[in-house]
Image (tube, rainbow, N blue to C red):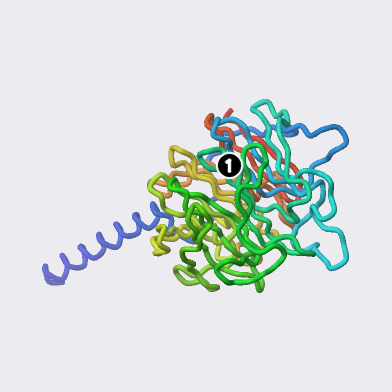
């Protein structure tokens, strides 16, 4: 082989090797990521409900600005995955006199609750920098649902987005809004849709709830979406969308420009990014409800936003199941304790470092 050809082939091989390393670092790999260490132990029954009240399904969890209190959106004691909603049958918080929005202090004591009669199907929850609690009502029935609520820390309704009980794709409508996140300047981003014939988009509003723009359509290509189940924002202001049916996180800027996609955090039901840009991603569907993600284990993956590396993995203790299992919603407090909101097992788990 001539020297020039040999050196060209060597250069190509080096370039491909470097590209392969970069691909692994940034997570563009389809190989299951199940082997990260688990430095956490679980704490069951940490959050204490009043006597006579039992946990229902929950997928919404967030951290108060105090850094240690935990907010939860709970479905009024009911086992309530979306598949169980049927006409003429009570579902989730429909007809319940229980408050679905709950605040627990660092010891797990319930210190505040509100929202009775306002929500049908509390799904996503986030807490903004002023301590306001944002909740998506992810289904619609009998004049309720398909809305996003902004509550003050004391439970006063400060803002509603969407039309109560109306599913649509207009600028003032949602169809199964799954999650919401708020930027430092107050701009609001709603992950709108939950699969099937619902929407598959992100909707942006200003701090007063005025529509700015929307982006995304159903599909599997870059920038396309199938089940926008969770959304979070890093310190740079980038949006991390849990594109669940596509088994990836998609990253956008705040104008909707596609930046990247990460499959290494598995099938994202929940996404949370803390102030140090540690990312926490909950997978509740792989090898159970999902039929297109075998080999990946359910659980919570922890990693770095800076390079996309997965650094820890808390596996679902249930090996085999056909339904949703382990956390759907996830959050972490200022001390690094992780909280998993579970739909199937109907509980809020806490994980602390060993």
Residue 244: x, y in percent? 58, 61
Residue 4 left/right relative to 262: left
Q: How many marks?
A: 1
Residue 268 left/right relative to 93: left
Question: Residue beneath label 1, please?
Answer: 132
User: Residue 259's image quarter?
Assistant: bottom left
**Which residue: 21% across, 67% down?**
9
Residue 350 left/right relative to 36: right
Q: Bin the neighbour count of mark 1 within 10 Å (Cα to Cα): few under 14, some 14-19, many 20 and up.
A: many
Q: Residue furthest top?
A: 107
Q: Is residue 31 visible?
A: no
Q: Is residue 334 above or below residue 258?
A: above
Q: Is residue 197 above or below residue 264?
A: below
Closest to the observer, 75 or 99:
99
Closest to the observer, 56 or 71:
71
**Which residue: 84% across, 50% down?**
96
Residue 172: x, y in percent? 58, 66
**Which residue: 82% across, 58% down?**
91
- Image quarter (top left, top right, bottom left or bottom right) of the C terminus: top right
Closest to the observer, 270 or 99:
99
Q: Secondary structure at mark 1?
A: loop
Q: Is residue 75 visible?
A: yes
- Image quarter (top left, top right, bottom left or bottom right) of the N terminus: bottom left
**Which residue: 44% across, 45% down?**
184
Residue 215: x, y in percent? 48, 68
């Amino acid at each position: 082989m001539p020297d020039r050809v040999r050196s060209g082939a060597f250069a190509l091989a080096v370039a491909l090797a470097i590209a392969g390393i970069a691909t692994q670092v940034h997570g563009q790999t389809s190989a299951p990521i199940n082997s990260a260490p688990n430095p956490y132990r679980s704490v069951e029954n940490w959050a204490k409900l009043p006597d006579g009240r039992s946990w229902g399904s929950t997928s919404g969890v967030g951290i108060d600005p105090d850094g240690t209190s935990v907010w939860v959106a709970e479905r009024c004691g009911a086992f309530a995955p979306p598949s169980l909603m049927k006409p003429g049958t009570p579902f989730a918080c429909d007809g319940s006199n229980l408050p679905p929005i709950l605040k627990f202090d660092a010891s797990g004591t319930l210190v505040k609750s509100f929202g009775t009669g306002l929500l049908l199907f509390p799904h996503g929850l986030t807490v903004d920098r002023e301590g306001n609690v944002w909740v998506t009502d992810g289904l619609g029935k009998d004049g309720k649902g398909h809305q996003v609520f902004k509550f003050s820390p004391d439970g006063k309704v400060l803002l509603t987005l969407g039309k109560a009980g109306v599913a649509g794709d207009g600028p003032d409508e949602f169809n199964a809004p799954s999650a919401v996140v708020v930027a430092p300047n107050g701009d609001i981003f709603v992950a709108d849709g939950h699969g099937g014939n619902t929407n598959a988009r992100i909707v942006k509003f200003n701090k007063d709830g005025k529509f700015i723009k929307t982006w995304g359509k159903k599909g599997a290509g870059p920038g396309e979406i199938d089940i926008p189940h969770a959304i979070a924002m890093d310190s740079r202001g980038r949006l991390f969308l849990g594109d669940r049916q596509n088994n990836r996180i998609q990253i956008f800027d705040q104008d909707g420009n596609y930046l990247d996609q990460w499959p290494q955090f598995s099938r994202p039901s929940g996404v949370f990014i803390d102030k140090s840009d540690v990312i926490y991603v909950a997978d509740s569907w792989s090898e159970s409800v999902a039929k297109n993600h075998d080999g990946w284990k359910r659980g919570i993956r922890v990693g770095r936003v800076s390079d996309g590396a997965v650094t820890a993995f808390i596996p679902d203790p249930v090996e085999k199941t056909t339904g949703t299992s382990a956390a759907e919603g996830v959050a972490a407090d200022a001390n690094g304790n992780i909280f998993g909101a579970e739909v199937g097992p109907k509980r809020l788990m806490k994980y602390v470092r060993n």
